[in-house]
Image (cartoon, coloured by chain):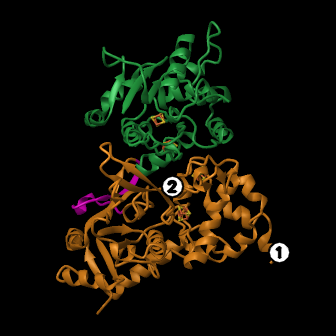
Chain colours: A green, B orange
Amino acid sequence: MHIGIVGLTGCSGCQCQFLNIYGGLSKLLERAKIDYFPLLQDDNVFEEFDVIFVEGSVTCGEDKEKLKLAREKARVLVALGSCACYGGIQASIEETACGHFCLPVSEVVEVDCKLPGCPVGVERLLESMAFLVNGVKPFEYPMTVCHECRINENDCIILKGGICQGPITLSGCGAPCPQMGVGCVGCRGDSDFPNYEAFVSLCESKGIPKERVEKLLFLFRRRR
Amino acid sequence: MRISWYLPETGLQDLVDSLSSFGRLAAPVRRGDGHVYEFVSSASDIDFNFTRTKLPPKKFLLPYKRMVGVYHPESMDYTPVGNEGGIVLLGVHPCDLHGIEVLARFFPELREKAFVVGVSCLPDEHCFCLDAGSAFAESALFDLFLVLLEGGFLLFVGSAKGIGVVEKLKGLIREATEEEIFLCRKFLEERTKLFRKRTLPLAGTSLLIEALYHSQVWEELSKDCLGCGTCTNVCPTCFCFASYDVPDIEGRKVKRVEFATSCQYPVHSLVAGGHYFRPSLSERFKHRYYHKLVGYTRQVGKAGCVGCGRCSFFCPVGIRMEEVLERLLYDQGVNHRC
Ligand code: SF4
Ligand code: SF4
Ligand code: SF4
Ligand code: SF4
């Protein structure tokens, strides 16, 4: 099995998560060859791939070309991290200064699998790798961050008077932020059919003006 | 044999020790702003001063995420992975005892799995077990029940296993005096007075709720709902789960994992072909009330709401089970028309 890891416009944090799967990485290398990973290795070949992971958003012609080539060469293309999945924080600025664009990977080419997160969680990455090396699409079951947060029996930030996007954010991270007492900022993007209106009124009832809520809300989410 | 005993406070550790043969013991301990059931070995870690734990004892009976089996991807030889022995749940309030009873009607093996010790409690403004018919241990599943008194516990026996434990504690416990039983009666009386008064017990409303299936109230009240799933995740009787098979990276074995899900998530009603049986928020919102109060009653002869108040207490937007029902049953004048 041949794997490639391609970086577009992003912080490389999600690519680095490959190095944080420790024991998992050596197991992976027994079954797959990493042909292309410029962040990690000097010798890279770009030929045919079973799976290519693409990190980052598309912000220039060079990104676009790289991505289109990756799509041509990959049997399975995975959008790795929230920049690739939704455009990332850089996409939350509606108009970039000199009219540049900032697109999620899926708006340029067809994507087979999305692994959001800022950065993508190590556990989730490892589990997805296990699926992919066995030729199976990673299992997805969209719930909310609240699901994981409640199951961990954290104290709820909203009930304490704060703001947390957990109720309308896609599960899968294990709710590390509320666990540390910080409200979820929605880095994993939307849960299924999120009720923005109710969330905005909840925040307004806590004295946060609508414009501010929307700024927070679309830090990571793709504005529709 | 007498069925009520007095155990002095100092005997709690002995009780804990005497239960060890039934499995690991979980009891309420303080964590953060609330209480959680945790494995303990020392009685001094236990804190009975709580109204509701963050998660119900269900978390041990039907774990939120559980590996249920392993198979080989080629031979397909499947080996079920059983639950690791018994468990003792110490310090379970009557609502949760009834919650366990409800679960056990769906999953009969739970009756054997746990040794359950109930404990008396006082309600807050979210508790409505009195209306739900689950404010007392009677007719629920328990082996022993403790009523907290000054300096000790009244100990009631609910099963043959419970009698066995009492035998082991001989020397530490003594028969309860009539005065103590009188004190217990007084406590229950005072406790009953603390509940919010309602005109119609929840236990008698399932037919009305069914008849109001198309009420506008559902649409209206669901507008505030974030669909976070907290209400079902904290509920002692919700049991919905989904499962998936996850291979290991070597490709040598595949684990089958079951995990709790919620009817408040759209994916819960998604079937092959991309069809959602409950596509709208109000349908999902209504479904929970309908299943708990109408569905369970038909399925297992007991409502799926035991009035523990967790869903109301933990809902991030403050949607309250009791208020929704009051709005549904009263604001439309249903009680006046009869
Ligand atoms: S802290 Fe956030 S994620 Fe956790 S239960 Fe509350 S709203 Fe949900
Ligand atoms: S809790 Fe929210 S912000 Fe934190 S990792 Fe999860 S999705 Fe991202
Ligand atoms: S806890 Fe409240 S907001 Fe969340 S799904 Fe239930 S009713 Fe809706
Ligand atoms: S529906 Fe709410 S009040 Fe009723 S048993 Fe479940 S969590 Fe408790």
Amino acid on which disc 1 is placed: Arg
Residue B176 seen in render: no
- Element assignment for label 1: helix
Q: Is residue A90 above or below residue B83?
A: above
Place of residue B93 in the rendered image (x, y in percent of width and height, measured from the top left) = 42, 69
Q: Is residue A202 above or below residue B187?
A: above
Which residue is outermost to the left? B171
What residue do we see at 47% from left, 28% from top? A74
Given the image, what chain letter belongs to the residue carrying mark 1? Answer: B
Q: Which residue is mark 1?
A: B337
Q: Which quadrant of the view contains residue A60?
A: top right
Q: Is residue B156 above or below residue B241?
A: below
Place of residue A117 in the rendered image (x, y in percent of width and height, measured from the top left) = 47, 32
**Seen in the image, is B6 located left or right of residue A147?**
left
Q: Which quadrant of the view contains residue A4?
A: top left
Cα–Cα span, label 1 and label 2: 39 Å
The residue closer to the viewer here, A3 or B85, is: A3
The residue closer to the viewer here, B112 or B317, is: B112
B43 part of magenta stretch: yes
The magenta stretch is B33-48
**Seen in the image, is B39 located left or right of residue A221?**
left
